[in-house]
Each structure stands twice: as C-alpha cells, then as structure tokens.
Image (spheres, rainbow, N blue to C red):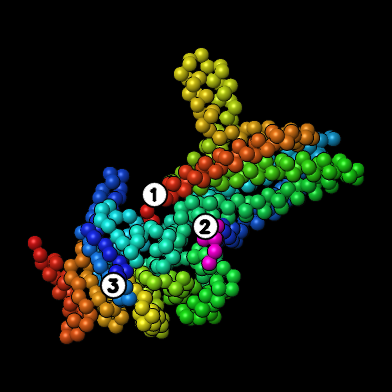
Amino acid sequence: MKAIEASNLQKDRVSGFFMHRKRVVTDLDLSIEAGCVFGLIGPNGAGKTTTVKMLINLVRPDSGKITILGRAPNDPIVKHKIGYLPENPFFYGHLTGREFLDFAASLFGLTGRAKKDRVTEMLGLTGLMPHADKRLAAYSKGMLQRAGLAQALINDPDLLFLDEPMSGLDPIGIHDVREIVKSLKQRGKTVFLNTHLLEDVRILCDEIAVMNQGRIIKRALTADLANISIQDYFFDAIEDREAAP
Amino acid sequence: MKDPFFGATRAIALNTFREVSRDKIVYAFFAFAIGLLIFGQVLGSLSIGQQVRIIQDIGLAAIDLIGSAIAIFAGANLLYKERERGTIQFVFSKPVGAAQYVVGKFAGISACLGVLVVLMSIWLYLMLIFATGPIDTSATGALFCNLACAAALTYAEIAFVVAMSIFFACFTSPLMSVVFTLALWIAAHANASLLAAARLNPTLATAKLLQGAYWLLPDLETATKIRSSLIAGILCDATVLSGALAYLACYTAILLAVSSMVTDRREHA
C-alpha cells in the first residue's frame, strides 16, 4: 500500500503588491510505500518545506493530485493518522511542556486517563520529564525541538512528517531522535524525513530523493548507494541539474 | 476518544483562555477597582444625592470600555501571533477544522472576559451597597437584578466585539483589525442615527442607501438604551431584554461563520 502518492504537483509563491509569482514546486511526482523511511534532501530554498506543507494540506497545490494513506490530505481521518514536526517549531510560550502535550492530545480527542498516560509517555520518550512543568517560553531550542517531536508522536501516527528534526539538537538529542525514528520503522510506520543532514539520510532512510529548484532530480534506494557516499550522490545530482541547459 | 468536534473546540478555547489570562489581563480588574473607587468618591461627593447613580453610570461604562478594549486587542493580536509564530500550522496539522478553531478562539477570549466582567460587576455592586448605606432587602434585590441585567447586556456586547475583532483579524493585519473593529463599534453605537438621517434625506437613493446601511450594520444603540433605563431603575421588559440578547447572539454567530469560511480558504504557509 502507498502511504503517499502525489502527481504533477505545482505551487507558485505569490508576493508583493503586483502579485509577483515564483514557482517553488514544479511537476512533482512522489510515491512512497507504507513502512518506508523516506528522506527528501536538497539545498535551502529547494521547495522541501512547501512540499511537506502541501502533503499535510497546510498549503494547497495550484495543480496536481495528492493521496495520503489512500485519502485526500484534508480528510479528518488522514489528520488523525499523521504527525507533523514543523521546521523551527515555536509553540505556545504560556504553556508548560505538559500542558502543551495535553493540548495536542485533546486536539485528537484523547481524554482522561488515556490522555494523561500518553502525555507522560511522550515526555519520557523525548527526555522532557524533568522540564515538564516549565513554560515553553523558558525552553532552549533543543528542548522545543523535543517538545515538537513529542506532539508529533502524541497520536501514535501511521505517517510522520519530520521537517529538519535535528535542528538545534545536541549530540544526545540527535542520537535520541535517530533511535525514535528507528523504532518507528521497526513498528512499520512511514516516516517522511525532510533534511539537509546527509548523515541522517544514510543512517535512517530506505529511500532518498534529491530536490532542487522545485523539482525532484534524483531518487534512489539507500541500499543501492552502498558503494558511493550520499554526499557524492547529492553533489552529483545538484551539479548535473545546474549544468543542464 | 470521543466527541472530536467539541473536544478540539474546547481544547482551543482552554488554550486561548490560558493565553489571555496569563497575559496579565487581571491587571485590568485592579485598574477598574481603583479607578472606580477614586472617581466614584470624588464625583459622588460633588453631586449631592446622585452618588449611587454616578457610580452606576461610571461603573457600567468602564466595564463596557475596558472589556471592549481588551476584546479588540486580544482578538486582533492572538490570531496574528498564531500566524507569525507558526503555531497555526501546529493546530491545522491536527484534525481541526476552521470552524472549531474560530469558535474555540472566540470562546476562550469571551470566557476570560466573562470572568473579568463578573469580577468588575461584583465590585461595582459592593460599591453601590456601600454608597447606598443601610437599606431594606427588597431595594438591594432590585438593585442587584437591574445590575445583573445591565452586566449581562454589557457582556453580550463585549462578546460581539470579540467576534468583530476575530472577523477582521482573519484577513487583515492587527493594526487594521483594530481600526476596522473600532470603526464598526462606533458605527454600531450610532446606528439609529442612520435611520433618522434617512427619514430627513430628500433624495430617495440616499435614503435607501442609509436604510440599507442601517440594516447591514450591527446595532449596539438599543443595548445601550436598555442599559441606561436599567441604570435609571426602570425594570426592563423581559421580551425586550431577551430580544436584544438574541440579536447580538445572531450577529455574533454570523460573524463567526464568515470568519470560519475565510480561515478555511487561507493557506498556512
């Protein structure tokens, strides 16, 4: 079964008084199997975050079709089954870590004991238990990233979108996130990893795609890249694209 | 898992309530209490025999002004902050619809202002009891009844202002939202003047235009008139009072419905 299917996606960014249009995603086709850890890599401004936002219906494509877990991305059933960690997460500073996760769990309709247990489990999993009753305004960048991961996992999603999950994390945090992704993979979950850290892709992903200037320019199974470094693969892809007429 | 629609709406309302209440809104109550204490005593002592009336007038006007001011700024700022900080992406990546979001925000701000209105009304009542001196229980009861009706009407008006503020905040900047809400609030308080102007106007087209504006714009003048009669000690007809409350509730519901539609069409990039 396909977890994500997208065909011919296009998206323009419209800005300024004269509604200047700039294409950020062009003719994007994606097909990701359920249970796969998929890594989307690319330079800054390649269109990776816009792609993720289209897949979770925060942004609507100008054209093309998206299917997530066999349904339209705006279907509430789909929303119940996905988790999303935004890039540079900034959450409600007035809430404590525990209150924030309680809020996230409530948005999924969790109540009572089940909600309390799930919140406690996520605080433990992401190492936030010692800071659970501290306000998010007092959290460091790394702690916010952990809180972001905790809220993304609160509903035990079948499909998880992680947008630059290692950003701001210390080595222990990076190790913890990698272990979480590995355990999700073992449980058959699908993970869409959006990153520019090539080492993460090599360690975690089953399949990778390189995106540049709004297009997916190269795609491969990581198992097929055993004899070349991901870095060489990435730079070859970017150079080929830029050399193209 | 149960009741996903109201569960999510309640969660957003609770989060908004926490955000507004932790934003030092309670200071507004202390400013009101101290202000009323000072103005009530000073102005009351200048007007022989009218101290109770003056405290009541100033008190209710202050509740209305403070509540409306907080409503305008909270509505405009909270939605803007959600977009600026990107927390709106967190909310809409969950199974939350635009209507749940808008109603949740409205309920949270309104609940917080409700607590503030109750606190200020109780303080006003205590000051009136103190200013009246020892009187019989029936007079105190009538005073309480009138004040409670006036406070309920004031609260309905404040909740309506919250809805106006959210409505404008859905598609403008916080500054413009404040300007538009203030303009509409002032127009709503002078709504009946449009009808009077229409009657006086000799041109049919202008008269029709003014009449159209009268029906389209919200009417807060009626609520103010009812409140004035309550202050004057005239017990209001229950039908008139409930009619005014129902009018504000309907207008509020329409604004929230349109706000939900606008939010639904927006992208959360």
Q: Is residue B33 magenta?
A: no
- Residue A63 image offset from top left, x and y in percent: 26, 53
Q: Residue drawn 59% across and 58% down?
A: B17
Q: How many marks?
A: 3
- Please name the amino acid that badge 1 sits on: Arg
- Residue B200 image offset from top left, x and y in percent: 56, 16
Drawn side of residue A126 relative to residue B236, left or right: left
Drawn side of residue B81 relative to residue A223, left or right: right
Q: Earlier in the sequence, mark 1 or mark 2?
A: 2
Q: Is residue B6 magenta?
A: yes
Circle 2 sits on which residue?
B5
Q: Which residues are magenta?
A: B1-9
Give the class, few, some or many, for how many residues have Cα within 10 Å of label 3's Cα (few <14, many ≥20).
some
- Please name the amino acid that badge 3 sits on: Glu
Q: For the residues tagged 3 and 1, is the chain the same?
A: no
Give above or below for A189 relative to A77.
Answer: below
Q: Residue drawn 63% across and 47% down?
A: B67
Drawn side of residue B141 relative to residue B236, left or right: right
Subunit of label 3: A
Circle 3 sits on which residue?
A33
- Please name the amino acid that badge 2 sits on: Phe
Circle 1 sits on which residue?
B265
